[in-house]
Image: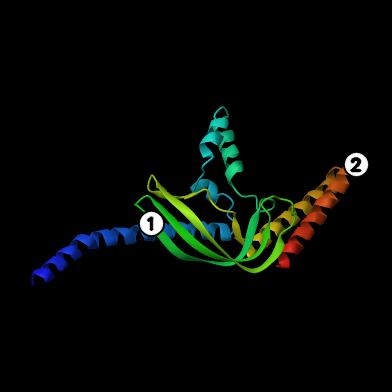
Amino acid sequence: MWEKCVFAISILLIAPRLFAQADLESEVRKASDKFLMAEFNGDKYYRADFGLFSKQSSLQAKYKMLSQEHRNDAFYGAFSVNWLRDGISVIDSYKISKIKMIGSTEATVMVDFLQIGRRLVEGKDQFVTKNVNKNDSIEIKFKLIKSNWLIYDPPVPRIGKMALLGIYKKELEKAIKVANRRKKDMPNLGIESEHADEQWVEISKLALRAVESL
């Protein structure tokens, strides 16, 4: 009887901690899902809004003399994603495989990606290149700051193929529109300007084809 009582008391003492741990893991999973889905769909500002960067304080100090509007522009320029030029991975799918709580304010999330293409971080590759069915597992760190789970130093951006196709199609449409408008409204700009417009259109076409081939 005494052993049963001890066991029951132990359960009563441990249960609240277990429930609290489960609640925290649920919050972290929701934060992870939002971040992963946002970038999969091509949201270039999500990491700037919900990222926590180790170099953030130094950049904020650098921009402290700017107006608030320009300071925000500088911050977003530093931490948002340029899907056309930054180093990125193109993925077919992703799955959260493990969540590990570190106390009540930090967590690590293991995510498995199926990578089908990439643009190297160094920026030497102008176009996205194939990297067929490469399993890519990474650990993402989260920290709880003012009731929000923030991504600590977000990893290389990972975007879905369809979202990247949409971005490149818009870029091609923009290039064609600008080239046609200049030919019509500003015919005296000269051969160099016309050549630059044609080059922009051609590069946009090639970049789009590279994504289509993934």
Specify the quadrant of the image occupied by residue 42.
bottom right
According to the image, label 1 marks what residue? Answer: 101
Whether residue 19 is situated above or below residue 78 in the rendered picture? below
Quadrant position of the C terminus in the picture: bottom right
According to the image, label 2 marks what residue? Answer: 190
- Position of 80 with respect to 145 (left or right) is right
Q: How far apart in space, not on screen, are marks 2 and 1 (Cα)?
A: 62 Å
Q: In this view, which residue lies farthest toward the top? A: 65
In the image, 10 versus 69, the foreground residue is 10
- Numbered disc 1: secondary structure: strand
Amino acid under label 2?
A: Gly
Discs 2/1, front? 1
Instruction: Measuring from the top left, give residue 24's x and y in whole percent.
Output: 35, 57
Instruction: Measuring from the top left, give residue 102's x and y in whole percent.
Output: 38, 53
Amino acid under label 1?
A: Met
Specify the quadrant of the image occupied by residue 11.
bottom left
Instruction: Measuring from the top left, give residue 155's x and y in whole percent.
Output: 56, 53
Instruction: Measuring from the top left, give residue 34's x and y in whole percent.
Output: 48, 58
Give me the residue at 15% from left, 64% from top.
9
- Numbered disc 2: secondary structure: loop
- Position of 91 with respect to 126 (left or right) is left
Give me the residue at 75% from left, 56% from top.
172
